[in-house]
Amino acid sequence: MSNDRDILLLSVFTFITVSLWITFELIKTVKTTTVSSEVQQIVTPLSPKIDTDLLSTLKNRKPIE
Amino acid sequence: MAFNYKTDADRYKKYYQSLEPLLLSPKKRQFTTVVFSFLAISLFGWYAIRPTIQTILYLRRELKDKTKVNQQMEEKIAALIEAQASYQNIETDLPLLTHALPNNPNIILLVSALRTLANDSGASISGIQAADIPILAGETLVSTESATVTENPDEPVKPTVPSGKNKTVEIPISVTLSGSYPAIRSFLDGIINLRRIVSIETIGFSSGTTETKRPVANAQSMQINLKLKSFYQSQ
C-alpha cells in the first residue's frame, strides 16, 4: 500500500512540476519582446523641434573675423 | 543463448499471472488509471500542448509588437518630414553653428579676436598661451606659442580630445591681461559675447603696480590671469 502511495505521489508531483514549467515558459514567451534591438533603436522617437533661439543668440553675438 | 518460448515461458509465468488478480481489483484499476492519467497529461503537456500554446502566444506577441513598431515608424516618418521642413527654414543660419564650433582649430583667428577685443576694451594683453594644436584640421600638432607673446610661466597646456564618438576638442588658452577694472570687465563681456564658444574657466586677480598703458583716466591698474577654453569639432 505504501508503494502505491509513492507512485501516486510521484505522478502527482511530476504533473505539478511539468505544469509549472509549462506555465513559466508561456509567461516568458508572452513577456519577451520580439523586436530586435536594431529596430528598437530605429524607432526611437525623434523630436522635430529645432532650437532656433540658439541660432538667434548666436546671430546677436560678435563674430571673430 | 536463444530464448526458447516453449520451455522458458513457464519460468516467467508466475510474473504475468500475478498481475491478473491486481487488475481485477477495482481499487487497483482506479489507482492505475489515475497514475497513468497524470503521467500521460504530463508527457503530452510537455511534448504537444506546450509547443502549440507557445507558438500561439509567440505569434500573438509578434503581431502586437509589429503593430506597435509600425505605428512608431509612422510617427517617426512624420517627425522626420517636420524636421526636414524646420531644417530648410533655418538652413541659411546654419553657418552660425560652424562659427561657434568650427571644424578646425582656427586658433590664429581666435587669438587675433582676443587681441582685437583687448584693444577695443582698452586693456593690454601681456601674454597669450594656447595649447599645441594643429593649425588646420588634419595636420600634426604645431605649437602656437611662437606666434604669440608668452610671458606666462605656467606649464604648457595640452588640448583634450575626449574618447568615444564625441570628437569635440577642447583648446585651453591662458591669457594674462592688465588694465583698469572697466576695461577688464569690458574684455570679459566681450569674451562672453563672442560668437565662437569661449568659456572662462578661472580668473586670477592681482593688483598691478604700474599704470595702464591705455589712456584710462586715473583708473587703478589690475592684472588678471584668465584660463579660457575654446572648442572645435574634430573630423
Image (cartoon, helix red, strand yellow):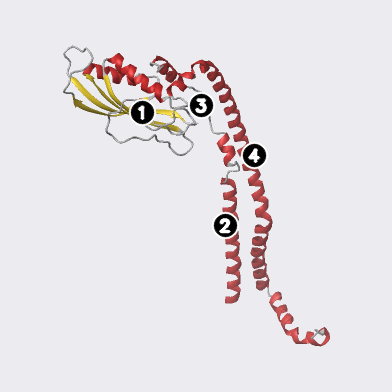
| Label 4: chain letter | B
Q: Nearer the viewer, mark 3 or mark 1?
A: 1
Q: Nearer the viewer, mark 1 or mark 2?
A: 1
Q: Is residue B142 left or right of residue B176?
A: right
* Dot 1 alpha-carbon crowd within 10 angstroms: few under 14, some 14 to 19, many 20 or more: few
Dividing the picture into quarters, in which one does residue B187 lie? top left
Q: Residue B16's x, y, as percent?
A: 73, 80
> Relative to residue B168, is residue A17 depicted above or below?
below
Residue at numbered disc 3:
A47
Residue that sits furthest to the right in the current view? B6
Q: Is residue A1 visible?
A: no
Residue at numbered disc 2:
A20
Q: Nearer the viewer, residue B61 or B124?
A: B124
| Label 1: chain letter | B
Check disc 1 and give the amino acid type: Ser
Q: Residue B141's x, y, as percent?
A: 43, 33
Q: Disc 1 versus disc 2: distance between alpha carbons?
A: 78 Å
- Mark 1 and 4 residues: CB-CB less than 8 Å, in contact? no
Residue at numbered disc 4:
B63
